[in-house]
Each structure stands twice: as C-alpha cells, then as structure tokens.
Amino acid sequence: MAAPSPCWHLYLLLCRDGSYYAGITTDLEARFQAHLAGKGARYTRSHPPERLLGSRAYPDRASASRAEWEIKRLPKARKLAWLLASASEA
C-alpha cells in the first residue's frame, strides 16, 4: 500500500517591511523556520518575515499551486481577506 500523499498548504507571511509573501509547502513550521533563517525564498531573504498570517490546506500540489497563483495576482489589500474567506469556505 502506498503512503498517503502529504497535505499541501498555501500560506501567507507578513514581512518586516509590511509586504506579504505567499508560498506553498507540506510542512508549515519547517518552511517558516527556513524563511526566518534566510534559507527560504529569495524574496524573504531580502524581506525577512515577521509572522505567518494564515494558511489553507489543499489535497495536492497542483491545487495548492493554482491557489498560490490566484492569490499572487490579487492586490495586497485583498490577499489576506481572500485567504481567510477561502479557509472559511472549506
């Protein structure tokens, strides 16, 4: 029997300069720690994260990637509202 697929998460970080960073991962805590250590995305190396604003689980990488693409297209003012509204609909 095959091992169950990991759950993917779309997450939104608040960076020190007030900007947001969206990404996907299977391990939120490890990924956040990587961003804090400067080993995450190039963006968070130059815009260090302060905290995790929220996340939403997805059943597979493809659906998480589609959601990441969607949230990154939104203006900053709508990103957190989209994530929280999406999470409450699940």
Image (cartoon, rainbow, N blue to C red):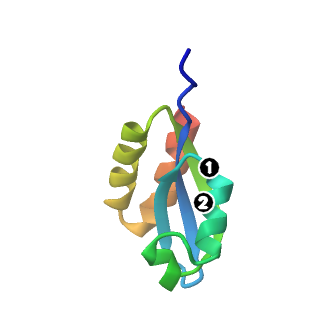
Q: Nearer the viewer, residue 49 or 37?
A: 37
Q: Are marks 2 and 1 in contact (CB under 8 Å)?
A: yes
Task: Name the amino acid type tagged 1.
Answer: Asp
Looking at the image, the residue that sits furthest to the top is 1
The quadrant of the picture occupied by the C terminus is top right
Look at mark 2 in the image and give the residue it sits on: 31
List x then y, in percent, for residue 22. 47, 61
Residue 60's disc number: none
> Of residues 80 and 31, which is closer to you in this image?
31
Residue at position x 61%, y 54% in the image: 54
> What residue do we see at 46% from left, 51% from top?
82
Residue carrying label 1: 27
Give how far apart the Cα atoms at labels 2 and 1 are.
6 Å
Q: Classify residue 71 by image quadrant.
A: bottom left
Crowdedness near tag 1: few (<14), some (14–19) or many (≥20) residues, C-alpha within 10 Å: few
Asked whether residue 55 appears in the rendered view, the answer is yes
Residue 9 lies, in percent from the top left, at: 54, 45
Measured as percent of width and height from the top left, residue 79 is found at: 45, 59
- Residue 55, x across and y down, in percent: 58, 50
Residue type at mark 2?
Arg
Judging from the image, what secondary structure is the residue with disc 2 in?
A: helix
- Which residue shows up at 45% across the image and 66% down it? 77
